[in-house]
Amino acid sequence: MKILRWSILAGYLTIALLPLIWLAFTSLKSQPEAISTTPGMLPSLTERLEDSGGFRFTVTKEAYGRLQETHTGASHSFISYLSNSILIGLMSTVAAVALGTACAYGFSRFRVAGAHDWLFFILSTRFLPPLAVVVPILMMYRQFDLQNTHLGLILLYTSFNLSLAVWLMKGFIDEIPKAYEEAALVDGYSHLHVFWTIIVPRARTGMAVTAVFCLISAWNEYAFALTLNNTRAVTVPVYFAGLQGNIQGVPWPQIAAGVILFAIPIVVFTILVRKHLLRGVTFGTIKQ
Amino acid sequence: MTKAELHTQRLKHVFIMPALVFLIALNIFPLLYNVILAFSDAELSGGDWQFIGGDNFAEVFEEPRFGTAIRTTATFVFLAVTAELLIGFILALTLREPFKGKSAVLTFLLVPMMLSPAVMGLYWNLILNGHYGILNFVLNLSGFGQPQWLTDPDLKLFSVLLVDIWMWSPFMMLIALAGLQAIPRHLYEAAAIDRASRFTVFWRITLPLCAPLLFLSVLFRTTDALKQFDLIMAITGPNDTATQTLSALLYQVMLRDYNIGLGSAYALVILVIVIALASVFIRYIDTVQRRQGRASP
């Protein structure tokens, strides 16, 4: 039984991680090597010998060096799209966490008429398929000149992440004992003061966890970004998708190098919040 | 009401309203706008539009692509969620007992689900490529020939499924694992005293006690898989009969054919399906939360 258990786990882990290892290898290849029908399987730091039986490829950092170049079919380099993603991701995350924390505090500590219904209304916005609302948003954005701007996507991702932020933060704030605030309120401090000096410092872990999940979903978002920002303030997923069907062939090593740079922050953040992953992916409905 | 109480009443709106205003402006308003558009002949290029009554809806139900898209979506959601549930549950069973490095293994397992589906979908094109893809290279060496994953109409949906399963099985594992770990030890001890067989223990204790969380994970994945768009765009594009799900069809009609009125009618029909599912989901989350609330003092 134990052997079966370990072989299933090891087998799955290998199959699941091989694509990611292959991604790293591809980023270290040259273009002809990347689309070779007899691909090198393992990296070799020395020059490739034609008669070494294949199975090895020469490591080159060329793909990473060429990330600053502009590809055919794109108007900027990867780095500039990456900076759009960073700006939009960070700003929308800050906004979603700030608004979400305040809203969660309101629902956690005040008696709100129909609080239960409001909370479920907030949750229900998460089920909206982006494509069902994207055209009305597109028309609104044209009216307000928000199409192809950073601000447009920042506002959209903020609202898109609010349901998650409110639900996660409500869970975290509910866990903070009320005793501290009650003392402060009796002493005559206002709720704003209490929120800022008592709740925010104690909810810091929760805010960090919420921020990571908001950042990841803004970072990875594609449907809205594709339809709203296709000429300026283009984010990385849209840029990558546009490289498909490139006349000169898909530049796989550069794509792989870009994907790795794009994915590293996500992997780091996943590791940082590993204790709270369950909570994050289930909107705080399951607490461990 | 005292002055202080009145002040508190007003203050609570300061905390709650900004978030609600945001949600209403960017979720509810577009939704209502969408309803209006569904009864119009608007086009993306702009210009005047007028109400044309229910014509768009008549067109939706006459359109053969719509029926096909519903079938494709149902097939995709069913196969993806079933496979992910099975794989995820089996993985959770293997991860049940504590061992050294468990936390690291768990984190590694979860990485695919945190990555961008659009970007990983693009990258999977390299793996699945019929000529130079690594998958076919390996299959060919092992004597399985060279299936054309990305161009064979019988295989395209399977390719999308494969990537979806790769990304989302860990999600099921994570929730199933929480379910397994919440099962009280003493039940197993009692079963051992009664000399219950492994099979009985699994069917009478493990599965039923884990079922509520498994159901929650199925609901989560179903509502997400229904929306799946990124992977389909990256692997086959929005206008491929073999993989044209409702989301892909919606994108094609609205943003490639520029027919907003018809697209909005599609969107409404899809919304009805999503809302039906979401209301089941929300009711279930409500019961799960109430149960948790009762369990903790």
Image: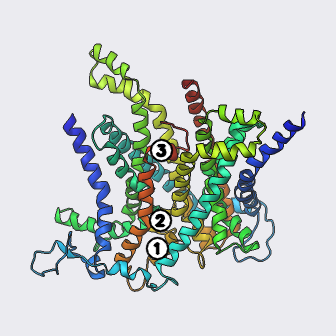
In-image side of A257 versus A194 (left or right): left
Question: Do residues under tags 1 and 2 come within 8 Å of each other at their CB atoms?
Answer: yes
Say which residue appears at 48% left-offset and 42% top-offset. B218
Question: How far apart are the alpha carbons under marks 1 and 3?
Answer: 30 Å
- Badge 3 is on which residue? A276
Residue at 73% x, 75% y is A145
Q: Amino acid at mark 1?
A: Phe
Q: Which residue is mark 1?
A: A240
Query: Where is residue A283, by image quadrant?
Result: top right
Classify B75 as above or below B284.
Answer: below
Task: Please determine whether, in this image, residue A29 is positioned above or below residue B82.
Answer: below
Q: How is the image coloured?
A: rainbow
Q: Crowdedness of circle 3 by 10 Å Cα count: few (<14), some, many (20+)?
A: some
Query: Which mark is on residue B118?
Result: 2
Q: In this image, B87 relative to B273: left or right?
A: left
Q: Is residue A22 left or right of residue B221?
A: left
